[in-house]
Amino acid sequence: MVLYNAQGSFLVGPQLPLATKKGRQIPNEQRSALAPQRMEAARNIVLSGHSSATARSLSSAYNCMGMVFAARRTWVEPQSLRMILDDDGYRRVGDKSELQQGDIVVYQDGNGEVSHVGIVASINRNVTAGDWDVTILSQWGRDGEYFHRADDVNPLLGSPTEYWTDRI
């Protein structure tokens, strides 16, 4: 199904051919870009409310799942995450000390549902806190792509609960 707006741009369009390594289709949808003024307003809101956030991109054509698993080309619903992790050979990382750049972080909402994903951009030992400072790169819905602390996201995006890797 393809839906068009009054200007003739598609709102919800066809799927890209996208599959897991095992060949299962990953449902996705093409979405039209939002107006640049809307994206600038979103960036201003994000940056004013999240001290660790730095904008990387103001694209609205993909979501967090599309950024991580579809090369920033389409919208993929979080319900596909478990299938992708299983089919693509990811394994859960048990401890933050094992993380490396490129690993995946999974966020869950208050009901335990997957609500957001991102990519580990950096990890540094925080000796003072006795923990690790993890910086994530993720797409915040249609509001742009940001580098941010793992725990510094909009509450609607949930909390970081799991880390995954496809490394050997």
Image (cartoon, helix red, strand yellow):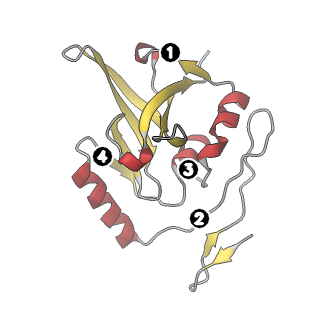
What's the CA distance linking mark 4 and mark 3? 18 Å
What's the CA distance linking mark 3 and mark 1? 28 Å
Residue type highlighted by circle 1: Gly
What's the CA distance linking mark 3 and mark 2? 12 Å
N-terminal of the pair, mark 1 or mark 4, is: 4
N-terminal of the pair, mark 3 or mark 2, is: 2
- Give residue 94's mark: 1
Q: Nearer the viewer, mark 3 or mark 1?
A: 1
Residue type highlighted by circle 2: Arg
Q: Nearer the viewer, mark 3 or mark 2?
A: 2
**Quarter of the rendering containing residue 41:** bottom left
N-terminal of the pair, mark 3 or mark 1, is: 3
N-terminal of the pair, mark 4 or mark 3, is: 4
Label 3: state its secondary structure. loop
Quarter of the image containing the N terminus? bottom right
Label 1: state its secondary structure. loop
